[in-house]
Image (cartoon, helix red, strand yellow):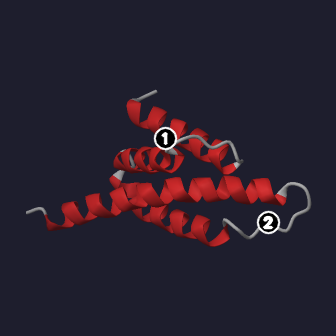
Amino acid sequence: MGAGKIVQLVGVLVAVIVGLGVSFDYSAAVIAVLGAVGGYFIAEDDRSRFLIGAIALYMVSGALGDIPAVGEYISGALDGLSSLFNAAAVTAIVLTTIDKVKP
């Protein structure tokens, strides 16, 4: 397992745990940094699909909050993942832009 996969797995784990309500100091910053670093390891061929997935996750992250007993937790976990994916999407967009303007 490479460094990229480890960063991505730790990012998902932290985002879900924070989304479920277990927060700590600077948790949002940790999620943002892990997302940005994890976004660097997204393969060039997968960036478009990843960006579509990040948009879809952002759109549905709060949609399951009305489910009795578990909706709040599902929405929280999806909100945390959405934050992670959005940070990674910024990195993917920057890398794609750099690849496009490179001679």
Mark 2, other Cα within 10 Å: few <14 / some 14–19 / many ≥20: some
**Which numbered disc covers residue 82?**
none
Vertical comparison of 30 with 54: above or below = above
Q: Is residue 25 left or right of residue 101?
A: right
Q: Nearer the viewer, residue 32 or 2?
A: 32
Residue placed under numbered mark 1 in the picture: 8
**Which numbered disc covers residue 65?**
2
At 47% across and 32% down in the image, what residue appears?
6
Point out the tag, 1 or 2, that comes first from the N-terminus: 1
At 67% across and 69% down in the image, what residue appears?
60
Residue farthest to the left, as pictured:
103
Q: Are marks 1 and 2 in contact (CB under 8 Å)?
A: no
At 53% across and 45% down in the image, what residue appears?
27
The quadrant of the rendering that contains the C terminus is bottom left
Mark 1, other Cα within 10 Å: few <14 / some 14–19 / many ≥20: many
C-alpha separation, residue under disc 1 versus residue under disc 2: 26 Å
Residue 71 lies in quadrant = bottom right
Residue type at the position of mark 1: Gln
- Place of residue 48 in the rendered image (x, y in percent of width and height, measured from the top left): 42, 65
- Place of residue 64 in the rendered image (x, y in percent of width and height, measured from the top left): 78, 66
For the residues carrying marks 1 and 2, which lies nearer the camera in this image? 2
Residue farthest to the right, as pictured:
68
- Place of residue 10 in the rendered image (x, y in percent of width and height, measured from the top left): 53, 36
At 44% across and 44% down in the image, what residue appears?
34
Residue type at the position of mark 2: Gly
Residue farthest to the front, as pictured:
25
